[in-house]
Image (cartoon, grey):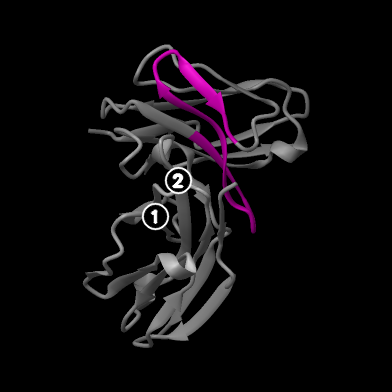
């Protein structure tokens, strides 16, 4: 069965600090997809990134970067030079093919607070 | 495009009442799903559909029904509301399994 673990439940940092959000997953499939979503205080879910199991390249998008390591079943998310607007709950999620993304399994989320 | 829309935004029910949460998308997406979000639990899949006329159960389907008569709409029915169904409900859609899901704004349901 698939499972996503976000061990950290809450982190508080000061603006401009770097912060890494950990995500560890379990799956028996060789083909799967990993996602990160952001849920700001307003409540909507914002898609950040999707990665398939065959693409282990790390990705950088502005201040955001993601480190995918199949050897440790981890898909960690780093925010560089955090800002107050980064304050949100962040979810890591997993879906297995052939079902695909309509059957996401989410971690319990990690609440990030960035203080000015 | 309106994207994924959900109505109502808020709802209060008494135990035993029934109601339907509406979800519609105008992106012609084949895949649609319903999740519930409870504090400290993340989001959990209730039901999903991979196309009109096709639905299946997710992780927490008990007490809920769905149908998918059109590509656009995917309503979620609570048959006899219970306090344990107090939650925030999110509907989502995606073009197919290889893409991310687009989420609606959510419905906050309280059952007293």
Q: Position of residue B20 (x, y in %)?
A: 57, 22
Of B71 and A26, which appears nearest the observer? A26
Of A75 and A28, which appears nearest the observer? A28
Q: Position of residue A42 (x, y in %)?
A: 44, 56
Q: Which residue: 57% across, 73% down? A: A10
Q: Are marks 2 and 1 in contact (CB under 8 Å)?
A: yes
Comes first in the chain, label 2 or label 1: 1
> Tag 2, which chain?
A
Is residue B31 part of the magenta span, yes or no? Answer: no
Q: Residues within 10 Å of mark 1 (few under 14, many from 20)?
A: many
User: In the rendering, which numbered label is found on residue A95?
Assistant: 2
* Relative horizontal placement of residue A49, taking residue B64 as reference (left or right): left
Q: Which residue: 47% across, 33% down? A: B33
User: In the rendering, which numbered label is found on residue A35?
Assistant: 1
Instruction: Name the quadrant of the N terminus of chain B.
Output: top left
Q: Position of residue A77 (x, y in %)?
A: 39, 70
């Amino acid at each position: 069965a698939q499972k996503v673990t976000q061990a950290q439940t809450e982190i508080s940092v000061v603006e401009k600090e770097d912060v890494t959000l950990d995500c560890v997953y379990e799956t028996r499939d060789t083909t799967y997809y990993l996602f990160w979503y952001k849920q700001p205080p307003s409540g909507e879910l914002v898609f950040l990134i999707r990665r398939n199991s065959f693409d282990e390249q790390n990705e950088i998008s502005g201040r955001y970067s993601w480190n995918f390591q199949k050897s440790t079943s981890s898909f960690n998310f780093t925010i560089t030079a955090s800002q107050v607007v980064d304050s949100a709950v962040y979810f890591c999620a997993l879906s297995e093919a052939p079902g695909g993304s309509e059957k996401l399994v989410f971690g319990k989320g990690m609440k990030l607070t960035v203080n000015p | 495009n309106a994207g994924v829309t959900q109505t109502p935004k808020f709802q209060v029910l008494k135990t035993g009442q029934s109601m339907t949460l509406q979800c519609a998308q105008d992106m012609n997406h084949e895949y649609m799903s319903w999740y519930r979000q409870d504090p400290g639990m993340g989001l959990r899949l209730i039901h999903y559909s991979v196309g009109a006329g096709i639905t299946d159960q997710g992780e927490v389907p008990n007490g809920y029904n769905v149908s998918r008569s059109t590509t656009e709409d995917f309503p979620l029915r609570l048959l006899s509301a219970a306090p344990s169904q107090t939650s925030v409900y999110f509907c989502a859609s995606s073009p197919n399994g290889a893409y991310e899901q687009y989420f609606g704004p959510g419905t906050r349901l309280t059952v007293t």
